Image: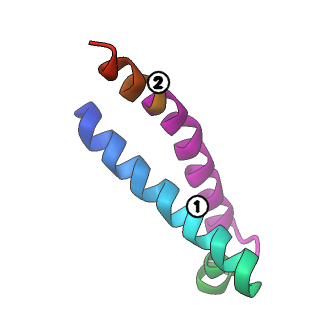
């Protein structure tokens, strides 16, 4: 898979996670729990994938920063 495609997919997942946290913070509404159940196996998988996506995007920040130094 192309790195740019992977970066885009994972960025979308991080944005979904950020929107979910915003909903929790502002309205006490957990969209993932609403759609898939509170801590069911599928919601836990979604939380884990979003979390791993966030960790991966840390490396994307480093790559973006290094592009500016060229």
Residue lying at 61% horizontally and 67% vertically, measured from the top left? 42
Q: Which residue is mark 2?
A: 62
Q: Would residue 46 be found to the left or right of residue 11 on screen?
A: right
Separation (CA) of disc 1 from disc 2: 25 Å
Left-right relation of 19 to 41: left
Quarter holding the N terminus?
top left
Residue 68, picture quadrant: top left
Question: Would you say residue 7 is visible in this rendering?
Answer: yes
Magenta segment includes 37: no
Dot 1 falls on a residue whose secondary structure is helix
Q: Relative to residue 44, is residue 30 depicted above or below?
A: below
Q: Which residue is mark 1?
A: 46
The chief SS type of the magenta part is: helix
Q: Is residue 9 left or right of residue 28?
A: left
* Residue farthest toward the front in the current orientation of the protein: 69
Give whichever of discs 1 and 2 has the lower sequence position.
1
Residue 57 forms part of the magenta stretch: yes
């Amino acid at each position: 898979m192309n790195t740019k495609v992977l970066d885009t997919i994972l960025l979308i997942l991080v944005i979904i996670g950020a929107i979910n946290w915003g909903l929790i913070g502002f309205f006490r509404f957990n969209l993932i729990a609403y759609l898939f159940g509170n801590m069911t196996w599928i919601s836990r998988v979604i939380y884990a994938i979003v979390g791993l996506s966030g960790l991966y995007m840390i490396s994307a920040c480093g790559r973006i920063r290094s592009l500016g130094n060229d």
